[in-house]
Amino acid sequence: MASRLLGGMLGPFQVVPKRNAIRMSRRPDMPLQRAFAFIVAVLALTAGRSALAQACGGEGARNCFAIHATPGCSDGTCCSHVCAFDSFCCEVEWDYICRHSAVELCNPPVPANDTVAGARNIPAADFEVCTIGATDSETTRLPDGCGGMFGSDIRKDVWFRFRASVTGTAILTSCPAASKVVYSEFDPIILVRDAAGEPLACNDELAGCGSYAAVEWAVEAGSSYLIQIGGHDIYVGYGRFLLAEEGTPPPPNCPADLDGDGLVGAFDMAVVLDGWGTATGDIDGDGRTDARDISALLDGWGACP
């Protein structure tokens, strides 16, 4: 990979593209060599400007706030600002340092879920995380025992809301070992809160998985939980985390629909009669099929709500 400090000596001259200037020796000798080196230096700078113009805002250029293996990015103004500071970004590739410079110099948009009021609803599945443009929440201090060697604050965070479908356990991880789709460009902290905002679980580094975070907490079917994801410092990025739940689902909303067709009718009555005296046609949950189950079936007769 090319050096981040591009430039070099040309005889008695030094070309330093990062500063867009030519440093000239004060030696009075070798006038022809100096003249030749000066011409070479000017040509090098002209080529550098041409490469910058092609890399910034050119056809096929990619997002300035995303890491990619090609030089330059799609926003010409932002790209020029970054490359004036670091020419590597327009000559070799747009790496994480280039992206960080873009975040600092180019005012990326604030995510819609930057605050708890804008928390994004997510299911138990893998989901995208983006902290680019995120701000600090009103309270940054982590719960006791959650901070580590890099500090006790959560910075540049975004918010999600999850509603449990089972009573049991939920697991949220950023560890790539959990799934081939899971990754994180930044060092994440995960903080889970109840609907009122009280902390339930927090982690900034999972043992055995490097600097990645994972949490596990008890959930109740139908209850909502707030998930706050950020980092220790100003470095931000994209990620894809995995949320899973294990446990017992709640009772069905239509317990008299014994055959599961969405209707309480003659087929369900047949199940009750066939299971009389056993648990097969039990509707009221007492473990026995009897007259009370007939009553519950008649009360629920028709389409399930």
Image: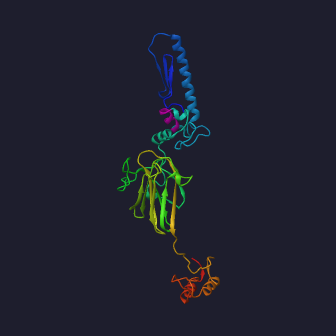
Give whichever of 130, 206 is nearer the camera: 206
Give whichever of 185, 236 is nearer the camera: 185
Image quadrant where residue 39 sits: top right
Counting every numbered tag in the picture gives 0
**Is residue 122 part of the magenta span, yes or no?**
no
Q: Residue furthest front?
A: 208
Residue 287 is situated, as x and y percent measured from the top left of the image, at: 52, 83
Q: Quadrant of the C terminus?
A: bottom right
Q: In the image, what residue occupies the spot 44% across and 62% down?
A: 217
Q: In the image, what residue occupies the spot 47% across and 33% down?
A: 85
Q: Is residue 165 visible?
A: no
Q: Residue furthest left?
A: 144
Give whichever of 187, 81 is nearer the camera: 187
Q: Specify start and end residues of the magenta stretch as a single range.
A: 78-86
Residue 204 is situated, as x and y percent measured from the top left of the image, at: 42, 52
Q: Main secondary structure of the magenta part?
A: helix
Above or below 282: residue 221: above
Q: In the image, what residue occupies the spot 54% across and 59% down?
A: 125
Residue 25 is situated, as x and y percent measured from the top left of the image, at: 45, 16
Image quadrant where residue 76 sits: top right
Display coloring: rainbow
Query: On the picture, is 145 further left or further right than 36?
Result: left
